[in-house]
């Protein structure tokens, strides 16, 4: 009978999937069972291309013929009725097509039974389209593509392949082949960025290559235009992607159609069920069901499918998100869009309040008290778990804070920076948060305590990045507010700024003034914490003076501070700083074994707290200490670990 397959396609970057299906076929022949394969993926992922390429590879093993039918699952009028699919396949078999539609499926089953046939069903809308057609297929193969997951087929022994984006190597082949010979020399980072922007979708990469071939931009200029503009406007010249996405959007029910653009408005790269419930203004359970339905239809990506630690997190493919955002702009009123985003930002801020309380024991910051008081009760982890979530969610939190500023939501703009401050300071992520503080200070009529908080925190961030003059200016402006209960904190920050300048004598005097100001706090619990912090700072300043006779004094102060933090509980970062300080003091005293042991303990604590930069600095010191002690292997190990951390930290 031959084959009715479409023209053999150019299939790039799918060798692994092709080999997988080929292996399944070998197993099926050996076990005398049918080869049943379901290939799913987002629009433009290359499902049909891969399936047809595989069909060509397997065709010779099915001497009774190869059949192909587009089942119209994403067609504007809906999926092709199963009777019509049967009619088309009977025609390909050159068999009579019964006049009665109900008899066509039975006739097809009869003609397929016992034969060695390869059947390709492309763009299937639901499992019913497939299962109704299949009778005795024990010697045959059935390859199915669909834009949504079909668990009924998986339950019917279909093996499933989910297509993701292409890797950079495959993307380079597509772009350099379809563009022009000069692109063969394009820098790999440009290809990598282009592939990232296109989400690895073969159809998007091919269209980008066509734009490069026909346009006036260099590859670098084109990628920059994509990075700063709308990708669909730049790439989708003939509307191919628009049509693909339109087809998906048309195929959803009203609830899904409402959710699709609303979820795309969530700031940041991904979202969880809490943000989804806020965006949709639905109870958690109803929101979960809707998100899962969108995942089922491959409109939203389930990040937990590949990485279990990301269970419960979801995202849009970048191009799909751009399309869905455009739908929101067209179909939803501006007030609806803004209110949706505001609800999500509030939900994120309340989660941030819970994380900040667990991560740092500093007093509730003025201007953000409500976010702490109303904090998400579902988080009950410790500081380490809070650090893990803060690290993962950082881009989303920053995106939310910036979006709050764009919406001119004063209450949110004021609350975000102080809630972000502890993690920003400890991990060195200061610059972006400094911008948020400056934006919050644009509101001129804060309560005095709020102004004091913003100025005080800003001073700390400036100190952390070595902007000493700006730190001094912020401290002076905070003092000028006249909030006397905060004097201890301001003197402490003045001392830290002086210490970072190397003015240790003045730094110690500032710490002495901070200690004298502690009673002004009028909060016994915070007074005790302040004294422990001052002990730690004074220990470090004393050690930095480099006077051998003072090392014992410095060590005792550090040990005392460490004990204070341990007693308070859940002060992992400050505990780690104390252990590091004691390790360095021991090293200066010649006790190398103790120094290295304590240093390794501190490194582990820093890593648990997601403090990569502090861990890197400590590893470099450990390497120097090991070198000085003749422990070359240990030194090499520390340097290798530091380099590995540095590579991950820079990404």
Image: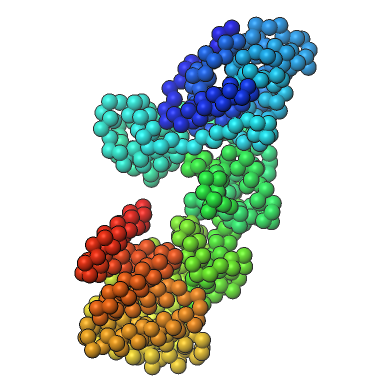
Position in image of residue 455 (x %, y %): 39, 76
Position in image of residue 177 (x %, y %): 34, 26
Res 641 visible? yes
The residue located at (60%, 71%) in the rendering is: 374
Res 233 visible? no
The residue located at (68%, 39%) in the rendering is: 253
245 vs 576, left or right, is right
Q: Quadrant of residue 395?
A: bottom left
The residue located at (61%, 35%) in the rendering is: 148
Position in image of residue 212 (x %, y %): 34, 31
Quarter of the image containing the N terminus?
Answer: top right
The residue located at (55%, 48%) in the rendering is: 304
**Residue placed most toward the observer, 457 or 515:** 515
Residue 607 position (above or below residue 574) = above
**Residue placed most toward the observer, 573 or 228:** 573
Position in image of residue 629 (x %, y %): 22, 70
**Residue placed most toward the observer, 573 or 148:** 573
Residue 516 position (above or below residue 598) = below
284 vs 412, left or right, is right
């Amino acid at each position: 009978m031959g084959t009715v397959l479409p023209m053999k396609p150019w299939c790039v970057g799918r060798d692994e999937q092709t080999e997988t299906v080929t292996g399944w076929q070998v197993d099926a022949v050996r076990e005398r069972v049918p080869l049943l394969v379901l290939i799913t993926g987002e629009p433009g992922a290359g499902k049909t291309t891969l399936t047809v390429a595989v069909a060509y590879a397997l065709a010779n093993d099915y001497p009774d013929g190869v059949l192909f039918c587009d089942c119209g699952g994403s067609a504007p009028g809906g999926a092709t009725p199963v009777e019509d699919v049967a009619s088309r396949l009977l025609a390909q078999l050159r068999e009579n097509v019964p006049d009665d539609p109900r008899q066509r499926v039975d006739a097809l089953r009869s003609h397929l039974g016992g034969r060695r046939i390869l059947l390709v069903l492309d763009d299937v809308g639901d499992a019913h389209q497939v299962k109704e057609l299949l009778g005795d297929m024990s010697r045959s193969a059935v390859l199915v593509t669909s834009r949504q997951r079909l668990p009924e087929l998986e339950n019917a022994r279909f093996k499933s392949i989910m297509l993701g984006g292409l890797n950079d190597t495959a993307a380079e082949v597509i772009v350099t082949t379809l563009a022009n010979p000069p692109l063969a020399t394009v820098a790999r980072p440009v290809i990598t960025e282009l592939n990232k922007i296109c989400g690895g979708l073969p159809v998007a990469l091919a269209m980008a290559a066509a734009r490069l071939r026909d346009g006036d931009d260099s590859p670098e200029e084109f990628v920059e235009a994509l990075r700063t503009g709308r990708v669909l406007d730049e790439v989708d010249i003939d509307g191919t992607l628009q049509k693909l996405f339109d087809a998906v959007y048309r195929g959803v029910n009203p609830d899904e159609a409402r959710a699709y653009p609303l979820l795309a408005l969530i700031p940041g790269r991904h979202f969880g069920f809490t943000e989804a419930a806020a965006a949709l203004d639905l109870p958690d359970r109803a929101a979960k069901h809707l998100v899962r339905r969108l995942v089922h239809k491959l409109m939203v990506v389930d990040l937990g499918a590949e990485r279990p630690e990301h269970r419960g997190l979801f995202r849009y493919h970048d191009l799909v998100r751009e399309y869905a955002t455009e739908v929101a702009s067209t179909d939803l009123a501006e007030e609806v869009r803004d209110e949706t985003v505001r609800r999500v930002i509030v939900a994120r801020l309340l989660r941030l309040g819970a994380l900040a309380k667990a991560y740092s024991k500093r007093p509730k910051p003025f201007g953000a008290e409500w976010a702490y008081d109303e904090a998400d009760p579902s988080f009950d982890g410790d500081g380490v778990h809070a650090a893990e979530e803060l690290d993962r969610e950082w881009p989303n939190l920053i995106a939310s804070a910036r979006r709050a500023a764009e919406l001119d939501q004063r209450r949110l703009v004021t609350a975000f920076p102080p809630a972000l401050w502890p993690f920003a300071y400890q991990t060195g992520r200061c610059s972006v948060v400094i911008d948020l503080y400056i934006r919050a200070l644009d509101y001129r009529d804060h309560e005095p305590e709020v102004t004091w908080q913003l100025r005080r925190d800003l001073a700390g961030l400036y100190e952390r990045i070595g902007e000493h003059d700006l730190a001094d200016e912020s401290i002076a402006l905070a003092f000028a507010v006249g909030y006397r209960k905060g004097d201890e904190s301001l003197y402490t920050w003045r001392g830290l700024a002086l210490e970072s300048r190397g003015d240790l004598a003045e730094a110690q005097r500032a710490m002495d003034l901070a200690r004298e100001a502690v009673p002004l706090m009028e909060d016994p619990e915070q007074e005790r914490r302040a004294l422990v912090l001052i002990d730690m700072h004074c220990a470090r300043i004393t050690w930095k003076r480099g006077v051998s006779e003072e090392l014992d004094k410095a060590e005792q102060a550090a040990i005392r501070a460490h004990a204070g933090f341990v007693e308070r509980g859940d002060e992992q970062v400050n505990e780690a700083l104390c252990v590091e300080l004691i390790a360095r003091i021991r090293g200066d005293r010649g006790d190398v074994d103790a120094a290295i042991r304590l240093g390794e303990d501190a490194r582990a604590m820093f890593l648990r707290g997601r403090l990569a930069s502090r861990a890197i600095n400590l590893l470099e010191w450990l390497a120097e200490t090991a070198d000085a002690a003749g422990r070359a292997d240990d030194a090499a190990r520390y340097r290798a670990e530091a380099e590995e951390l540095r590579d991950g930290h820079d990404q």
